[in-house]
Amino acid sequence: MDILTILISGIAGVAGGFGISKVIEKKNVSNLIKGAKKEAASILKDANVEAENIKKDKMLQAKEKFIELKAEHEQVILSRDKKMAEVEKRVRDKESLVSNELAKAKKINDDYETKTTEYQSKIEVLEKKQQEVERMHKSQLNQLEVISGLSAEDAKEQLMEGLKAEAKTKAMAQIQDTIEEAKLTAQQEAKKIIINTIQRIGTEEAVENCVSVFNIESDDVKGRIIGREGRNIRALEAATGVEIIVDDTPEAIILSCFDPVRREIARLSLHKLVTDGRIHPARIEEVVAKTTKQIDDEIIEVGKRTVIDLGIHALHPELIKVVGRMKYRSSYGQNLLQHSREVSKLCGIMAAELGLNVKLAKRAGLLHDIGKVPDAESDLPHALLGMQWAEKYGEKEEVCNAIGAHHDEIEMKSLLSPIVQVCDAISGARPGARRQVLDSYIQRLKDLEEVAFGFSGVKNAYAIQAGRELRVIVESEKVSDDNAAQLSFEISQKIQTEMTYPGQVKVTVIRETRAVNIAK
């Protein structure tokens, strides 16, 4: 009984303690919640105050920006008004000039009408005299017919036959003399034509190929590039060897130099200097030196990638560098490296079809224009200079001959030489390859089709394969199978004699007869 009482008392004590702890815990939780609510209210109050301050700042900034934009807009309006006034002045000047020209034209018209009236009267008098002359001529002819015993038509026929024979003899002699004279003077005249052409278009080509434009964000940068008393620009020109032209051209600086590599070094150096913002002579020399090394490394890397892509091995490091320099050289608007890659691939394909050494053909195609990127000036043509370089760096005789002979500078001694020559012409003749030959290329295609349409029985004609093939569709009723072969030959002969084109033109004549019936 005592043990039971003790147990009950213990259990009651434990339950009471547990209840008391729960009450205390609940009270603490309520106190924590109240404290958190007070803290949250304080944070919200501070956040509202801070938001109001930020709002006021942003409104002030917006007002300032609005005032700034308004001022800029007013400046723009003023400049436009000034330009409009200038335009109106030019219009008034042109109106006065036009009125003067109209007065002169009216005077000239009046004089013309007066002279026309005079000429009309003179023409009437001449017509009367012409009629009198014809009448007298007829009477003289009648008298001559009676005296000679020949009619006028017979006498005319005999005279014409004699004159034809005499004229033919004289014409043949004249033609022979002209041919002989042309042979003597052809080379001299050709040189004159070439010199005149260079004089007319040389400046434009030089401008396109010797100038780079460096764009800047604002004209304020120009002053920083020039520097105090021009020290910065002189240091930049001395370090790069490029002439820098800072003129009134808005947001642009012109870099002028014949060497495209030096122009690229100058352009990249300027970009780094303008981006960095630190422009002074010592910094300029440092940046130019780093950029030069970067470009040299890039040239070597481009050369390596090119020879790897084409599967060419054991190429001399100097030749690899020359191949990389082709990236910065253009010929007639065509990138020289891209052109050399095209020629290399074409040579490989053609050599494979002919059963020749594909690797040597690719090698010769890639290196055929290396003479266009010399490190120093040379008086030799680029083909011979490239051949000398190839011989110097241990290339095979076939490759060297192909390089030197692709413009007929020397005699061709291997089958690779005509392949390189033809592939070079193909790469340059495709549409869009070179700027100035695009129009002539389109005209050549039109001329090919026009030659075919000049023959009877031709229904359609299409110049395909970049002008290397002509497909002619004829009417089966007018042209037989035998005549089709003859027509193909005649068209090819006419193209050969009347047109100038690279490579060969294949003429295909298609004749087709169709009998169509429908079963219902």
Image: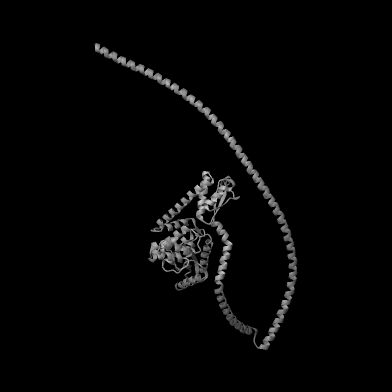
Taking 368 as reference, is 130 left or right? right
Between residues 449 and 33, which one lies in front from this camera angle?
Answer: 33
Given residues 240 and 418, the one toward you in this image is: 240
Q: Is residue 494 visible?
A: yes
Side (left or right) of 201 relative to 415: right
Image quarter of the C terminus: bottom left
- Numbered marks: total: 0
- Colouring style: one colour
User: Which residue is nearer to you in this view: 274 or 406?
Assistant: 274
Going by the image, does 143 lie left or right of 468?
right
At x 70%, y 84%, the residue is 140
> Where in the figure is residue 464, as x and y percent of width and height?
47, 63
**How far from the left and from the top, in percent, is residue 508?**
45, 68
On screen, residue 389 above or below 20: below
Residue 270 appears at what percent x and percent y? 52, 48
Percent of width and height locating residue 92: 70, 52
Q: Quadrant of the N terminus?
A: top left
Q: Is residue 419 visible?
A: no
